[in-house]
Image (cartoon, rainbow, N blue to C red):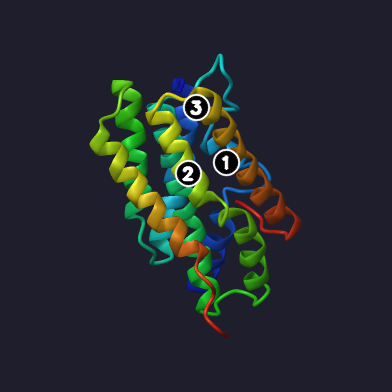
Amino acid sequence: MDPLTIFTLIEKGIAVAEVLIKAGQNAGPAFQALRDLITGAKTGTVTEEEIFKTEALLDKLIADFNADLPPV
Amino acid sequence: MKIVRTLVLAATLTLPISGCANIQKLFEIGTASITNPVTPTMLKNAEDGMIVVFAGLNAYRDTCVKGLIPPDCRTIIQSIQVYTRQLPPLLIKARAFVRNNDQVNAVVIYNTILDLIESAKATAVKNNVRVI
């Protein structure tokens, strides 16, 4: 990704993370993803280990969101 | 009241979703093609972007489940889930195709994932899920 794209993404990501914190939510995953993005942008490459970590985290977050809503 | 306002703000942020916050910017790699193949780094960047999206989505879901925002949020979540529930098997396939450098299939699946995200965004906009 080009630097402008990275900066745009980081800006949006920080805004999301900030609101998550203010709302008492866990912003850890958002910050981790941002850190990974920055690291990846710096090096231009990613390790298998980083990829597996990202995949596992994303899978969990998607599963959490996709779960059936509890009854009212 | 302040906390409720904050939670509503979190809720509106969640789907980086509509209006000025274009969800595709979180993937920002744009549509893939044979001349713009899906590399492991590109896919990981997209997944990092999705992590931020889903962290926000889950915050919206949490505030909804706790009853802190209007109950129609349940319908909105379910309408977004129509698209997000299609993602897991596609991600598995995309990862496999990228690892095997099967670009023809990787590009198709990758673009399908982007289309799903766009559909989720359209659904959010239609349901007046606003962003800051």
Kind of residue at badge 1: Ile
Residue topped by disc 1: B113
Give the Cα separation between the discs numbered 1 and 2. Answer: 8 Å
Residue drawn at x 52%, y 63% is: A66
Q: Chain of mark 3?
A: A
Asked if residue B123 lies left or right of residue B45, the reply is: right
Give the Cα separation between the discs numbered 3 and 2. Answer: 23 Å
Disc marking residue A55:
none
Kind of residue at badge 3: Thr
| N-term mark: 1 or 2 | 2
Q: Nearer the viewer, mark 3 or mark 2?
A: 2
Q: Chain of mark 1?
A: B
- Seen in the picture, residue B86 relative to B113 is either above or below; the reply is below
Please say if the residues under marks 1 and 2 sit with CB atoms less than 8 Å apart: yes
Q: Chain of mark 2?
A: B
Judge the density around disc 2: few (<14), some (14-19), many (≥20) Cα neighbours within 10 Å.
Answer: some
